[in-house]
Image (tube, grey):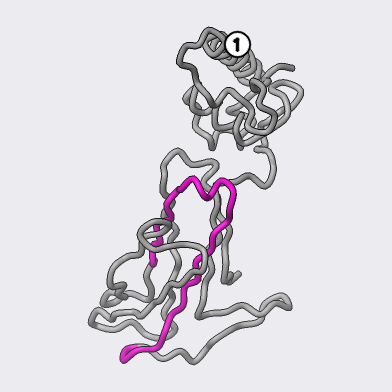
């Protein structure tokens, strides 16, 4: 199935960047020489160099039938509250014409010349392994604190065979103890981890059952 857009999130990534390969596919025969491809990227919400980084001078190599145009998305604080979008477009040049502009598949019209990438650092739903009966109501703040304090790969939370019942019980106990310890520091006027305070309620986070 050909698609002309995708929606990605940083929430399961440990790194502060995401490399998104966008396939550019040749329709026709390969050539004996490298051929430059003209691609433009525009956005009303994201800024090049700050929110995304583009490859320089994309080329379909000699003998090849396509290339992966790799867009690097950059994690910023703004993505926690706002989804951004960049729009890619391929253009004709002295090496390529663009005879096909769109195709119809399963009743939907899909562009063959443009591609949109939506990206954020937000959840649309709790990860698969999260159990509110064991670690309380899901929030992104709690999720990020768990991963930071216990050094858990965020992607693990989408695999119940990794984040098991026993692991969730361990997380609940460790995070409850951590919040209690940091709260005591706060009450004593000592430096403490401010991320233990719920941004919505102003109270310490609850990881209890």
Quadrant of image for the N terminus: bottom right
Residue 136, by quadrant, is: top right
Residue 159, by quadrant, is: top right
- The vertical placement of 79 against 198, above or below, is below
- Quick one: 31 or 58, which is closer to the camera? 58
Q: Residue at x 63, y 44 (%)?
A: 123
Q: x, y (%) of residue 55?
A: 32, 65
Residue 125, by quadrant, is: top right
* Label tally: 1
Over which residues does the magenta segment extend? 68-95
Q: Quick check: 134 left or right of 57? A: right
Crowdedness near tag 1: few (<14), some (14–19) or many (≥20) residues, C-alpha within 10 Å: some
Q: Residue at x 41, y 41 (%)?
A: 15
Q: Quick check: 33 left or right of 108? A: left
Q: x, y (%) of residue 187?
A: 57, 10
- Quick one: 74 or 99, which is closer to the camera? 74
Magenta span includes 53 = no
**The residue tagged with tag 1: helix, strand or loop?**
helix
Q: Quick check: 104 left or right of 63? A: right
Single out the residue that lies furthest toward the left.
33
- The vertical placement of 106 against 177, above or below, is below
Q: x, y (%) of residue 209?
A: 74, 17
Single out the residue that lies furthest toward the front.
189
- Quick one: 23 or 74, which is closer to the camera? 74
- The vertical placement of 74 against 155, above or below, is below
Q: x, y (%) of residue 47?
A: 42, 62
Residue topped by disc 1: 180
Magenta span includes 82 = yes
């Amino acid at each position: 199935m050909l698609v002309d857009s995708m929606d990605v999130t940083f929430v399961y990534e440990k790194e502060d960047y995401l490399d998104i390969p966008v396939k550019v596919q040749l329709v026709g025969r390969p050539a004996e020489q490298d051929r430059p491809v003209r691609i433009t990227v525009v956005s009303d919400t994201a800024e090049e160099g700050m929110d995304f980084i583009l490859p320089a001078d994309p080329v379909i190599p000699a003998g090849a039938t396509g290339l992966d145009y790799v867009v690097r998305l950059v994690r910023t604080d703004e993505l926690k509250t706002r989804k951004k979008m960049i729009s890619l477009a391929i253009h004709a040049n002295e090496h390529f014409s663009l005879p096909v502009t769109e195709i119809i598949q399963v009743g939907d019209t899909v562009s063959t010349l443009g591609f949109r990438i939506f990206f954020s650092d937000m959840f649309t739903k709790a990860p698969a392994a999260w159990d509110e009966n064991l670690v309380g109501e899901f929030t992104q703040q709690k999720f990020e604190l768990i991963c930071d304090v216990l050094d858990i790969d965020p992607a693990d939370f989408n695999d119940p065979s990794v984040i098991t019942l026993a692991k969730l019980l361990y997380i609940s106990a460790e995070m409850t103890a951590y919040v209690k310890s940091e709260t005591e520091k706060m009450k004593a006027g000592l430096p403490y981890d401010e991320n233990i305070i719920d941004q919505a309620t102003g109270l310490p986070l609850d990881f209890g059952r």
